[in-house]
Amino acid sequence: KRQADVLKVITSFWQKHGYSPTVREISEAIGNSAPNGAMTLIKGLEAKGYIIRNGIQPRTIRILRLPSDNANGGPTDVPPEPGIYENVPFEDYLAWDAVSNSRISLALRSLAHYRASYTQEPTPAMRLGSLVHCGALEPLAIAQRYAVMPAFEQDAENQTKDGKPTQSKATTYYRDKAAQFAEANRNKEIVTQAEYDNLVGLVRSLASNERAIEYLGGEGPVEVSIVWEDHNTGLLCKARIDKWQQNKQRFCDLKTCRDPLKFNRAIAEYGYHRQAAFYQVGLHAVLKDIRLWQSPHLVAIEPAEPWGLRAAPLHDEWLIIGREEVNRALRLIAEAKERDIWPGYDSPDHWLPPGWYGAKESDDPIELSVGGEILAV
């Protein structure tokens, strides 16, 4: 009970001030006159993995996770109080019942899609994106989350039914070895050696680019989860930020992009401007300082060799557009919740051909028949 009180004090203090309380402030908040008593509780929370701190410097307590309300020990859909949280497992973050950027995108598609919480099966590009984020932002977690499938097809024991050596993956030997490996690593995602080698090349490319190092390196937590209440609609919102450098008033998002030279088009197509605006508003709401607006920076990198990349801050024009889209989506969601009406697509008056259909690359005139006469236009 006393440890829970201390954790609540730390969380509330973070929400109000944007940094952690001192031991004395914690002691006073829980009504304990002796700081030694509060320190014992803090060390207990640290031993249980709820917080981390620097024992030498003051105000360095960081929240790693919160106690789960789920009796089964799995992720709970009850989000924590508004605030900033580090080291929250991604599965826990996904389970929190709050409006996210991906759900805003669904609401702009249709409110029926938002209500259905339409989810897409992970594509190869999505799997690569998850692997890249882990390798670039949390390299020490690679071994905990992923396992590289050995090349069992190259083993001497890998043979056809006739006993001939082969490198086929369709043999009984290979299937049995792969199944055993998957069972031994059932809590990890299996990746191929080629996928892992590609990740190594990509991370090296990031490490050799000055801007990428500046944006993704240095002080500041990664994979930061934030929760806040939208002041216009009262909706509870959440976000997951790749890298936050509070001392430089900026956050960074890492994106894989087939052609970084056309990344502006990708920003519009995938709504990265809306995502950045949503995150910016969330941090502003949690930090509660009208003078501080965290600046979004984006790193776009090719997913394959030579892993070319470009990195830059997002222009304010994009953020203005993004905030308008976010506000419109949140209003639609709030109205739909209040009325419990979740409409789908609007139907057009007519199905019209797109402007590009039938267009000719040449300047040859088009012949039209009008009143029996042929006209060239």
Image (cartoon, rainbow, N blue to C red):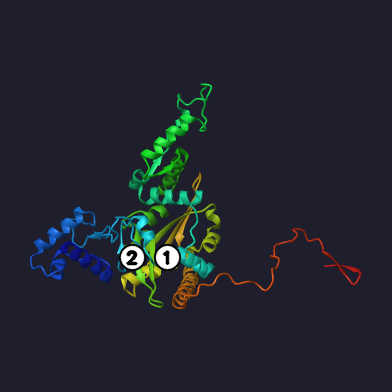
Residue at 23%, 69% in the rendered image:
13
Looking at the picture, which amino acid does disc 2 mark? Pro
What residue is pinned by disc 2?
79
**SS under mark 1:** loop
What residue is pinned by disc 1?
100
The quadrant where residue 237 appears: bottom left
Residue at 35%, 43% in the rendered image:
143
Quadrant of image for the C terminus: bottom right
- Neighbor class of circle 1 (other Cα within 10 Å; few <14, some 14-19, many 20+) is many
Using the image, determine if residue 183 lies above or below residue 133.
above
Q: Residue furthest right?
A: 372
Instruction: Report, in whole angstroms, how far the alpha carbon at label 2 lies from the one at label 1.
Output: 12 Å
Q: Earlier in the sequence, mark 2 or mark 1?
A: 2
Using the image, determine if residue 207 lies above or below residue 279.
above
Is residue 84 in sight in this rendering? yes
* Label 2 with label 1: CB-CB less than 8 Å: no
Where in the figure is residue 84, as x and y percent of width and height?
Answer: 31, 64
- Looking at the image, which is closer to me, 335 or 222? 335
- Looking at the rendered structure, which numbered label has been put on residue 84? none
Is residue 56 in sight in this rendering? no
Q: Is residue 36 left or right of residue 113?
A: left
- Looking at the image, which is closer to me, 34 or 201? 34
Where in the figure is residue 139, as x and y percent of width and height?
Answer: 35, 47
Q: Is residue 146 left or right of residue 72?
A: right
**SS under mark 2:** loop
Q: Is residue 74 left or right of residue 167?
A: left
Q: Nearer the viewer, mark 2 or mark 1?
A: 2
Looking at the picture, which amino acid does disc 1 mark? Ser
Where in the figure is residue 185, as x and y percent of width and height?
Answer: 37, 41
Using the image, determine if residue 248 lies above or below residue 204.
below
